[in-house]
Structures are given as C-alpha cells and as structure tokens.
Image (cartoon, helix red, strand yellow):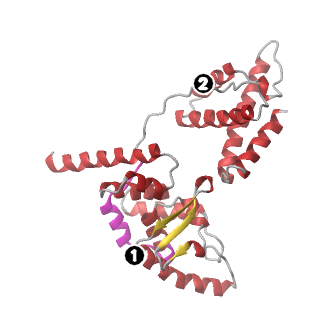
Amino acid sequence: MIIQQISDYLEFLEIEKGLSENTILAYRSDILSFLDFLVEEEKAKEEGREIVEAGDVQRSHFGSYTKFLMNRSVKPSSIVRKIASLKGLFRYLNAKEEIRSNPALGANSPRVPKILPKVVSLEEIEDILRSDMGGTKERAIFELLYATGLRVSELVELEISNVDLKNSTVKTMGKGSKERVIPLGSHARAAIEKYLEDRELTMKLYGAASKKLFLNNRAGKISRQFVYNFIRARGDKIGKVISPHTIRHSFATHLLERGADLRVVQELLGHSSIVTTQLYTHVSKKRLKEVYHSING
C-alpha cells in the first residue's frame, strides 16, 4: 500500500537523513495532500480507480496537481516545495526498486521570482544594541544571533557545553545533522557571560539542572515563539518588521559587505550549496546602489 511506502520514506528521512521533526511533518503534509488530490481526481472520472500503490501514479498526475494548486492561488514557492517533496519520495521508491520507473522525473514547477532576503543596516543593528533589551538573557540572545547567524531552531537547542567561552566558539547542529563551529565575537561572549550569572540564579530558584543554554523564567527551555516575539519587539524600536531570520540575513550580508569570502560565509551559515549563499551577494550590490543614490541623487 502507498501509505506504508510513505511511512517507510518518512522513517528513512528521520533515521538516515537526520531531518528535523518539523521538516518531516512538512514532507508528510505535502505528500498526503497529493494523495488526497489523486483520490478526488480519480473519483471524478467515470471509470475512476483507487490509487493504492505508488506504481499507479502517472506522470500526468503531477501536471494536473500543479494546475490544481495554481487554480487555488497557492504561492509558486509553496508549489515548488510540494513538488520537490514528491520527487524525493518517488526517487526513493525508484532507487529501492519498488516502482519500475520514476513518474516524477521531469515534473515541472512554476518559476519562483527571486526574492532578496530582508536585512537591516549596520546602523539599525547598532540602534537596537543601544536600546534597552529587557534583561541579560534577551541581550545575549540578540548578540548571539547577530554574531553567529544561527537559525532560531539552532539557538533554542543550544546547550551550555556547545559554548566555549575560553576559545570564543559556538558549536551547533544544523540541517541534516551537520555540525559546525562558529567564532564568537567579544560582545556576544561578554553578553553570554553576564547572562550565565542570572541563569545560575534561575536554576537555583527552581532547583533545576537543565543543560540548555537559554532558559525561560521557570528554568525550562525557551521556545521559538519567545525568540520571535522578542526580535519582533526589537524591530518595533526601529520601525521595521523583522524576525530572527532577518538577523541571520543581516549577519551574512554585513560580512560580505566587509569583504568576507563567499565560501567562508557559506560555512558559517551551514548552507549545503554555494548557490544559496550567493543570493547575499545580490543583497550587497543592491545596498551599494541604494547608498550611492542616497549620496549622489
């Protein structure tokens, strides 16, 4: 049955590929949505047949599904992601010889317009850093995000042992369980050192023994939502809507503007492909033009 094949594939992604729970849930949702579409499409036919095996899926189904999604005004980027999820499933089944041929080969997706990452300027970062953060934890979070370009998921999972203050480095486990070690600047290190004093008091107050670096007010692990809300509030201070990912984008863009090598930035961000990192070079060029025209009119 195709349901069992899907279950096996998701287990493969978890165990063999080391993908996160959220990523696997997204794959599952994309694949099951396609399956629901196939069932409804076959029902609409006079001689409709139930699709119970991956081998029943035909290449034409992918074109029909793409048209269906476009008619529903689904964003092109979401359609591309859904088709990519399906391609991964059928590539896996074909490699395991559970299907004779891969019906997803050559499946087309709509073109997605290149959207440059949103960034904040160095001056705006400095304005935020000069403002009242609310506490040592909040300041340490912001300093660490901007100093390392960590993803919010990586930040909330950091453990005390991941931060080496003596050697000024942070070790994190990124997408696909890829470990990377990132240098830690003096400002971020100092902010973390201050926060650790308050963290110790929180631990004693609740008799906790958490390994996580950042704790909530009850000595539990902080949530992603806490970080999002905090960063959004920092954006309000400068009149911009920003997120933790905005800080990550700004980290990369500012490095490139100061002459950092693209490969170095790729390594720091944990990108598997240099193509992803190259997008930031377009941001730098765009900002350069903005600065030029602001001076020369």
Mark with earlier residue (1, 2)? 2
Q: Residue at x 41, y 50 (%)?
A: 118
Horizontal side of residue 292 vs 102, given as left or right: left
Q: Amino acid at mark 1?
A: Ser
Part of the protein shown in magenta: 117-138
Tell me residue 293's x, y (percent).
Answer: 19, 46
36 on left or right of 125: right
> Residue drawn 57% across and 34% down?
80
Whether residue 243 is visible to the viewer of this picture, yes or no, is: no
How far across and how far down the image is residue 152, in percent? 54, 60
Q: Which mark is residue 186?
A: 1
Q: Is residue 80 visible?
A: yes
Secondary structure category for the residue under label 2: loop
Q: Residue at x 49, y 59 (%)?
A: 244
Say which quadrant the N terminus sits in. top right
Is residue 22 rendered magenta in the image?
no
Magenta span includes 128 = yes
In the displayed structure, would residue 95 be above or below residue 128?
Answer: above
Q: Would you say 266 lies left or right of 64 here?
A: left
The residue drawn where x is 71% and y is 36% is 92
Q: Which residue is mark 2?
A: 106
Determine which quarter of the picture holds residue 279.
top left
